[in-house]
Image (cartoon, rainbow, N blue to C red):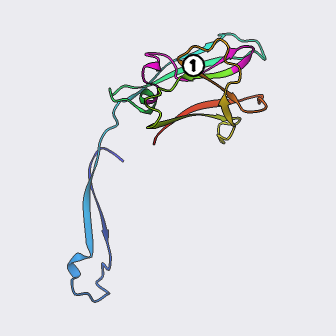
Amino acid sequence: MSNGTFVIGAAVDTGNAVTEENEGNNATSSGLAVYPPEDKLAAAGLSFSPSQPLPGTPVTLTATVRNGDGVANGFEYAFGTNAPAAGPLLTVRMANGRPVVETPEPDAAAAPYVDVRVLGSTNLVDWDLPVCPAADTTGKPADRAWHEPDGVRPERAFFKLEAELK
């Protein structure tokens, strides 16, 4: 659909086949304004570490997606001052000899209003891989949360953040 104002309508008994007391109320319409998309989301900073991994070496893929409209999105609200000014909100890294999913620690003041979850998948279709707080948090920065698959660690796993206002 292109930009502009469109009239959308609905009509019944257009042939006046049904005898009615008022034939003048069989149609209605309303205007619908379609605006151009605003450049509110910006993606940048795709990087790999290590840049030339050997087979079997864990790789950290990092990308940054930011809301550029000046209004806090769910993540910015949920993480408050723990959200990095630049850089990713979710990073998979090696810690204590095992991979962990690192996110900013949610702001306790926002907890009653927004729910943040780390979701896991083994196939990028079904986000049903259970994820829990990491058991070993030795060396974890105070403003970060570490997560890991609950139970057996799969050979391949994908993770994403989800924020929902309560």
Question: Looking at the picture, how far across and down is residue 110, in whole percent?
Answer: 44, 31
Q: Is residue 18 above or below residue 165?
A: below
- Residue 18 is covered by the magenta coloring: no
Quadrant in which the C terminus is drawn: top left
6 w.r.t. 52: above or below: below
- The image shows residue 153 at horizontal and vertical percentages of 77, 29
Give the tally of numbered discs: 1
User: Which residue is painted at 47% across and 33% down in the image?
Assistant: 111
Report if residue 94 lies within the magenta region. Answer: yes
Secondary structure of the residue carrying tag 1 is strand
Point out residue 109 in the picture as x, y percentages from the top left corner: 43, 29
Residue numbers of the magenta segment: 78-99
Residue for point 45% across, 37% down:
112
Camera-nearest residue between 108 and 9? 108
Nearer to the camera, 28 or 111: 111
* 94 vs 38, nearest the viewer: 94
Asked if residue 163 lies left or right of residue 119, the reply is left
Locate residue 81, reporting x and y percent: 43, 19
Question: Residue at position x 32%, y 76% from top?
Answer: 12
The amino acid type of the residue labelled 1 equals Thr
Looking at the image, residue 22 lies above or below residue 137: below
* Residue marked by disc 1: 62
Q: Residue placed at 35% from the left, 36% from the top?
A: 37
**Is residue 80 left or right of 28 when viewed as pictured?**
right
